[in-house]
Image: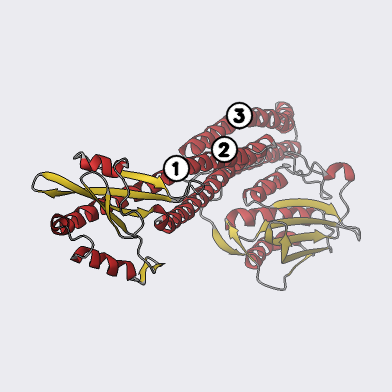
Amino acid sequence: MRFSLRIFLGYFLLVALLAAYVLSIVRDEVKPAMRQSAEEVLLDTANLLAAMVQPDLIAGRLDDGRFAAAMAQFALRSPQANISGLKHERTYLHVYITDGQGRVLFDSEGKAVGQDYSRWRDVLLTLRGQYGARTTLADPKNPLSTVMYVAAPIKHGERIIGSLTVSRPNLAMQPFIERSEQKLSRIVIAVILAGLLAGALFSWWLSRGITQLTAFARDVSEGKSAAVPRFVANRELTSLAQALGAMRDELDGKAYVENYVHELTHELKSPLAGIRASAEILHDELSAVDRERFLQHIDAEVARMQHIVDYLLQLASIEARRELDNTVEIDLNALIGEQISALHSQAGERQISLHSGETCTLRGEAFLLGQAIRNILQNAIDFTGEHGQIQIDVRYINTHAGMGVEINISNDGEAIPEYALGRLFDRFYSLPRANGAKSTGLGLALTRAIVLLHHGQVQIQNLASGGVVVRLVFPAR
């Protein structure tokens, strides 16, 4: 299982459990809170009605007094109210009054008159001077049929002469409770979804960083020139990437120096041996012609050594770089035209032609790209006959990574031997020229380093029709 998926599932489980716990707590609090609020309203209502009914109870006119008439009219009322989207078409308030012994004197529903309610908590506690209230099931088989009763004392002076109880079924509050629970459930679900989205984004962000680090480590292990990845708002991954980059540079530096010293020593042995042999001969008595010939040989070997050192310094500088500097938009057609003009004197009778159906541009360092193209053209001139053809084609292509630019430089010279095709980009490896000139064997190595620095690819192939083609492919950024 992927690391990011584990993080997401763990985050999902945590959010789901937390949301379920919060939802259960809030749901457990919704009903008690609403019923406490309703109880307070019933308490105020009971005390208000107790104060209103006191004169009628003292005068013994409960049945035909103003309070009884008012309650009769109240029972007939139809509010037709719309409270927060819920319609109310009837009243739910029930009122009964007892005397000082708990016997019912008045019942707004007319069912309990004359009954003894002295054992009900609302009446019992109120007649004792305490707060009296109770909740009773109207239907023992229905847990939602509870009715809340709240009583208030009816006093004559300081003496309690009766009690007045108001009641209301909790079922009347059930629509509000259910709506609150539904609203709460929607909110919790929205919070869970938002949390999951945040968790998914976080997992993707973390996984993407780890994937970049993995790709960087893989490129390093394969010897590719990869830039150290950078991460926004993640100091830990940034520090890890920088540590990996520093380790890569340290290891590359040691191996690079060791390899270069070995190759440079091997390559300089031949010209140094030639210079030493010529210098020893010059100590002898020689004719002027021979002396001049050996001096020219020494000058040529010194110049060759100088070229090797210059190329190595430039190659080392480019291979040590991880990113391009000061990039510009380059017109490849114009850049290639400049290199053709620069090599015009060396081309002799060879025909160098540029073919491009459109103006192709590439973002990079113009000087380096120009040098890479010149190195390839120089090799093409060296390995093409005096009246040969060198053709350059530039075009846009589609690659697996998107739009790209392809440069094909082909000649009609002799094919490259199969044993040499895989080594042409190695440092100090070169094939003999027809004119006998010696190469440093660093031109194509430098070209490859420049192409890789531009995130491109280069390959050399023999053409089936004869000749050789060098293909350069760059991303069109």
Is residue 336 visible from the viewing direction of this image? yes
Q: Amino acid at mark 1?
A: Val
Front position among marks 3 and 2:
2
- The residue located at (72%, 73%) in the rendering is 357
x, y percentage for residue 251?
Answer: 61, 29
Q: Amino acid at mark 3?
A: Leu
- The residue located at (31%, 47%) in the rendering is 36
Q: Is residue 43 above or below residue 234?
A: below
Secondary structure under badge 1? helix
For the N terminus, the quadrant is top right
Q: What number is the disc on residue 295?
A: none
Secondary structure under badge 3? helix
Tell me where residue 107 sits by quadrant. Answer: bottom left
Q: Is residue 452 above or below residue 362?
A: above
Secondary structure under badge 2? helix
Q: Is residue 364 above or below residue 27?
A: below
x, y percentage for residue 154?
Answer: 17, 50
Front position among marks 1 and 2:
1
Q: Earlier in the sequence, mark 3 or mark 2?
A: 2
Is residue 377 visible from the viewing direction of this image? no
Q: Which residue is mark 2?
A: 10
Number of other residues with Cα within 10 Å of mark 2, as a class: few under 14, some 14 to 19, many 20 or more: few
Q: Which residue is mark 1?
A: 22
- Residue at the farthest left position: 157
- The residue located at (20%, 48%) in the rendering is 162
